Image: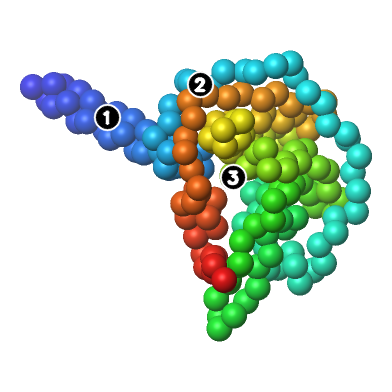
Amino acid sequence: MKTIIQYSILFILMLTLTSMSLCHKDLSEYGKWLKYYNLQHEYFEEVGEDLEFDLNWAKYDLNSEGIKLYEPFFIYSPDSTYYLDLDTYSLSIETKDGKLISYGSGVDMKVQVVRLSDSKSLTVLFCGSTCIPETAIWISNSNLEILGFTADEQGGMVPTKWEVELESGRFKELQMDTVLNLTDAFYYEKERLKNIEFVNE
């Protein structure tokens, strides 16, 4: 009888731990992005061939005051060797009455990896009006995934993921065979940058 009770307790504990791990997975940045748009991870498929980006590390063009302002929105690698900067190129923010405010993003968006050891940056993705990088996750200390959208010819938004390998300077593009009609309420504004008040003037 005691053994049955012990096994029952162990089984309940295992179910609890499994449930906790699933909740943690759902709350990851990738999981939150998928859930926000009601998308499924398994529907991503690679499009085209692997592409290359220039492994040209350049001086990071953000001063110490700017770094302090944008730092809450940087995404650090697991070993904190790098951080990912998705915002400083296109998004102007300022402090007003103790709050962060922005008047919106520019058309061009650039994703940079910044190396903390020497404050140099590497551009891994540059988008004009054809794509919107919204958020990202680190898969390892040198590999990451950028999540966002690519605009189709009719202006619809195609869910897109860019898998980036820093050491090789290569990345691949994956898309879903679906189109969302989005004009506002984007994830990056409503969730990732929710501490910024976006002002329309």
- The tag on residue 177 is 2
Front of the two marks 1 and 2: 2
Residue 165 appears at what percent x and percent y?
Answer: 75, 29
Q: Residues within 10 Å of mark 1 (few under 14, many from 20)?
A: few
Look at the numbered disc 1 and give the secondary structure of its residue. helix
Residue 145 appears at what percent x and percent y?
Answer: 63, 34
Kindly identify the residue that appears in the image at 82 percent across and 26 percent down. Answer: 52
Q: Which residue is mark 1?
A: 15
Look at the numbered disc 2 and give the secondary structure of its residue. loop
Toward the front, the furthest residue is 154
Front residue (pair 77, 172): 172
Kindly identify the residue that appears in the image at 66 percent across and 25 percent down. Answer: 173
Q: Looking at the rendering, in which quadrant would you find the N terminus?
A: top left
Mark closer to the chain start, 1 or 3: 1
Q: Amino acid at mark 3?
A: Glu
Q: In the figure, residue 148 lies in which quadrant?
A: top right
Q: Looking at the rendering, in which quadrant would you find the C terminus?
A: bottom right
User: Does residue 14 appear left or right of residue 85 in this picture?
Assistant: left
In space, the residues marked 1 and 2 are separated at their CA atoms by 35 Å
Q: Which residue is mark 3?
A: 134
Q: Residues within 10 Å of mark 2 (few under 14, many from 20)?
A: few
Front of the two marks 2 and 3: 2
